[in-house]
Structure formats: C-alpha cells, structure tokens
C-alpha cells in the first residue's frame, strides 16, 4: 500500500471528483502533476562562521487562470510532497474564489527557530536568488506561510528588486503596510471564514448566542476567528495551541486567553505550567485542561481546525460531535474521514473555500501594487465579503445540484473554471 502523504490525500479527492465530472483522459492528465517543480539547495554562512545548507522548493501547479500564487513556508516538514499538495490546493483555491491567479507553493526545509535574525534574512534573500528566473509579478507571486512574516516578505521584495533592478511592489504579497502591504491582510483568513459562518447560520435561521464553537489552533487565524465569533455572540467552549488547550461548557473569553498566552506562551497558561495545572483554580472557573485530540471530540455546534493538517482521520471521525466543521487549516481532514463525516451528516466547509480569505486579500494587495492605489479597510472588507459569499453560493449550488459534499463541490467548481481557462487558451485537445 503506498505511503499516505499530503499529495496522495489530495489526489484521492481530486480523482474522485474528476470521475464524477466524467473528464476525458486528456483532461485528467492536465491535473495529474504540477506544471513545474523547481528545487535548489540554499547555503548560508552561520553567525559562527560555519556553513549550513537547506533544501528549497518552488512548485508551480497550474497557471491557466493567471500568474502562479502561493506562500513560502520555513519548516522542517516542508518536503516536496507537502509543497506539491499545497501548490495544487492553491490552484483550486484561487479558482473557487474566482480570482485571476493559478497555484504554487514554496518551502525551505529547516527550523527557523534555530536561526538568528541575520541568518533568517540570509535564507530569505538566498531563496529569491535561487528561484529568480521563475518568480515575478506576472509569473509567480509569493506570499507568507508557516513561519514566514511580513518582514521576511519585505526582505524578499528588496532582494528581487536588487537582482532585477526594478521597482516591483506587486512581486510579493503579505508585506508590511509601510512597504506596499494591504490593510486587512493580517485578519483576512479568519474574516473570510467568519463571513461563511455568518452565511451558514443565516440560511439555517440559527442564533449565534445558542451556538458553541471549538477552535483547534490559537495562531493568527485561530485567535482572530475566536475574537470575531466571541464579539458576534457565539460561545467559545474550547481553544488550544501546540501544548494543549482548555475547555469550558460555559464559555471562554479569547481576550483573556490571549493575554495569558502572551505572558506564558500557552493557551492554558492561566492555569497550567507545563503539565502541572492548578486544579482548584480550574474547578473554580469551570475549566478543564484538554489535549488537541480531545478538543476535536468535544460537544459543540461548530468545530474549527485552525492548526495542523491530517488531524481528523478515520480513527476519530466517528467520535466528532460537531454539526459543522470549518477548515481554517490546510488539509486537516483525510479523505477517509470525509466519507465518514458525510455519512454522519456533518457538514464540512473545506479548506480551499474556508481559508481562501487570505489569498483573496493577497490578490487585492497585488492589484494595489500594480495600480499604486491604497484601498481603505472598508473597501477591502466589502470586496472580501462579496467574493467569499459568491464562492460559497457557487459551491452550495454545485453540492445541491449534483448531491455532492461541499469539498467535492468546491473541487468541481474549481476544476471546471480551470478547464474553461485551458480551453480558452487552446491547451485542451480532446
């Protein structure tokens, strides 16, 4: 049996949807592999004078609908299989929200926490030099991803402009506001997902004050989503980070959690130091310490995986009690788990739709970089909401017409749009 990887899991879903769409062999072949896989080894001089080398990748999956678009992650697990899967998902993600981009992804396989700030800048600049010929505002537009920041995007833009002797504010997105960034980019992923939750409960005539939410992951997207939902009247019953989390059926204030996380470095920091918890204080506040695995299985109306991939599997899918799952993380649910959840009537809003707010506002930043215009926060929010709701309606329509899950429907909408662009360009010869 072949090893399960992020890419094989993506292909399982892709193949199932292409079969439902009755694509020809020629059409299927266009989606079978990325158009380009670029590899390099980045070598830098460490602060102690020694040299260090890191594998680096840029995978360009499809550009039928526009320049490739995708983040760059610095992570020990950023191998070629992971980067391929993320590039493929990005191609579908840009298509499902109908913005004029293709899909790509980049990675440097290393632990950035082991590098100094100077060494990190060296890696960032070396990455651009390594892939200089295959990136650019009209070719492939990078962005931040895991362990990369607006500051790193600024270093990369500066290196690109030095190497090309150009002024290129549209070369990269996710930049600091002072260096060509867009208002609203820092909250875009969560805000896009929040608009979908609002639409979901409005259609079902549900009251936010009667709904309980659990969020796995308290990074930028998860924490921002927790604030949006809390302010809208939802009850947040569970939150977690990599060290575990807390559960309270009466509700958790994310502002308080954020305050203690800043102070202690952990979501459970108000109550626990490492694995040692103040049981008396937890009982008094009606709080329990839980693992990330336990969070997925608690009783709630909406479950939001906002951290790692591959966390909802065939082993725990039958134990999930949520009525709805909104995937802010990339690839949190395996294909096997998807089948179980669908049979159980649990609605999953898939990652390629749910977390597409980030790439949508990246598109706005690219437009602003090309035009020299700075959009207001209100304009960013208005356009983001319009695009996210249009995408939701297209997916919902496909799901109901063809009796598909929302994930299969989102894939189908994307595949059709990419194929339409390919046909227009004369790439599809049946």
Image (spheres, rainbow, N blue to C red):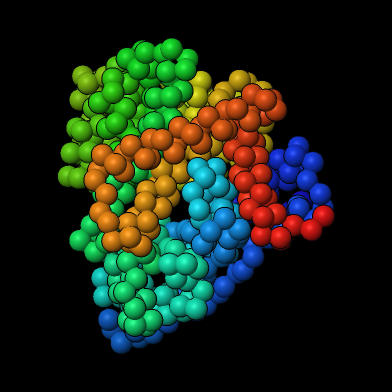
Query: Can you tell which quarter of the image residue 81 is in?
Result: bottom right
Query: Can you tell which quarter of the image residue 16 is in?
Result: top right
At 41% from the left and 75% from the top, the residue drawn is 128
Q: Position of residue 428 (x, y in %)?
A: 74, 57
At 45% from the left and 42% from the top, the residue drawn is 355
Looking at the image, which residue sits at the far bottom?
A: 49
Instruction: Say left or right for 190 vs 400.
Output: left
Q: How many marks?
A: 0
Instruction: Say left or right for 427 vs 379.
Output: right
| Residue 285 visible, this orientation | yes
Q: Position of residue 303 (x, y in %)?
A: 45, 28
Toward the viewer: 333 or 364? 364
Relative to 258, residue 233 above or below: above
At 64% from the left and 36% from the top, the residue drawn is 408
Quadrant in which the C terminus appears:
bottom right
Instruction: Say left or right for 101 vs 400.
Output: left
Toward the viewer: 172 or 261? 172
At 41% from the left and 53% from the top, the residue drawn is 363
């Amino acid at each position: 049996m072949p090893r399960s990887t992020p890419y094989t899991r993506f292909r399982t879903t892709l193949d199932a949807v292409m079969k439902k769409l009755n694509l020809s062999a020629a059409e299927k072949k266009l989606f079978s592999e990325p158009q380009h896989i670029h590899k390099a080894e980045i070598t830098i001089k460490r602060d102690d004078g020694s040299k260090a080398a890191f594998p680096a990748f840029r995978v360009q999956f499809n550009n039928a609908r526009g320049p490739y678009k995708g983040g760059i992650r610095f992570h020990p697990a950023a191998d070629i299989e992971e980067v391929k899967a993320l590039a493929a998902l990005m191609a579908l993600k840009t298509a499902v929200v109908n913005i004029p981009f293709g899909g790509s992804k980049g990675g440097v396989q290393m632990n950035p926490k082991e590098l100094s700030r100077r060494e990190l800048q060296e890696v960032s600049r070396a990455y651009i030099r390594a892939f200089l010929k295959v990136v650019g505002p009209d070719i492939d537009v990078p962005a931040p991803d895991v362990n990369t920041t607006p500051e790193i995007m600024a270093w990369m833009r500066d290196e690109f402009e030095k190497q090309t002797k150009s002024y290129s504010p549209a070369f990269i997105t996710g930049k600091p506001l002072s260096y060509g960034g867009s208002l609203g980019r820092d909250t875009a992923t969560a805000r896009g997902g929040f608009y979908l939750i609002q639409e979901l409960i409005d259609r079902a005539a549900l009251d936010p004050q009667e709904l309980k939410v659990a969020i796995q992951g308290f990074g930028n997207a998860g924490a921002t989503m927790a604030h949006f939902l809390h302010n809208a009247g939802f009850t947040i019953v569970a939150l977690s980070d990599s060290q575990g989390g807390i559960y309270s059926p009466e509700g958790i204030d994310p502002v308080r959690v954020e305050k203690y996380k800043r102070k202690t470095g952990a979501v459970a920091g108000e109550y626990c130091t490492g694995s040692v918890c103040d049981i008396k204080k937890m009982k008094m506040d009606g709080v329990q310490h839980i693992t990330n695995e336990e969070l997925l299985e608690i009783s709630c109306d909406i479950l939001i995986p906002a951290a790692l991939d591959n966390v909802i599997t065939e082993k725990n899918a039958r134990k999930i009690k949520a009525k709805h799952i909104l995937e802010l993380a990339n690839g949190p649910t395996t294909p096997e788990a998807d089948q179980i959840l669908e049979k159980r009537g649990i609605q999953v809003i898939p990652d390629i739709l749910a977390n597409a707010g980030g790439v949508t506002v990246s598109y706005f930043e690219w437009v602003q970089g090309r035009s020299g215009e700075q959009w207001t926060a209100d304009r960013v929010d208005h356009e983001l909401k319009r695009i996210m709701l249009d995408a939701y309606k297209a997916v919902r329509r496909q799901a109901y017409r063809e009796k598909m899950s929302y994930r299969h429907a989102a894939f189908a909408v994307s595949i059709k749009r990419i194929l339409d662009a390919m046909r227009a360009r004369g790439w599809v010869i049946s």
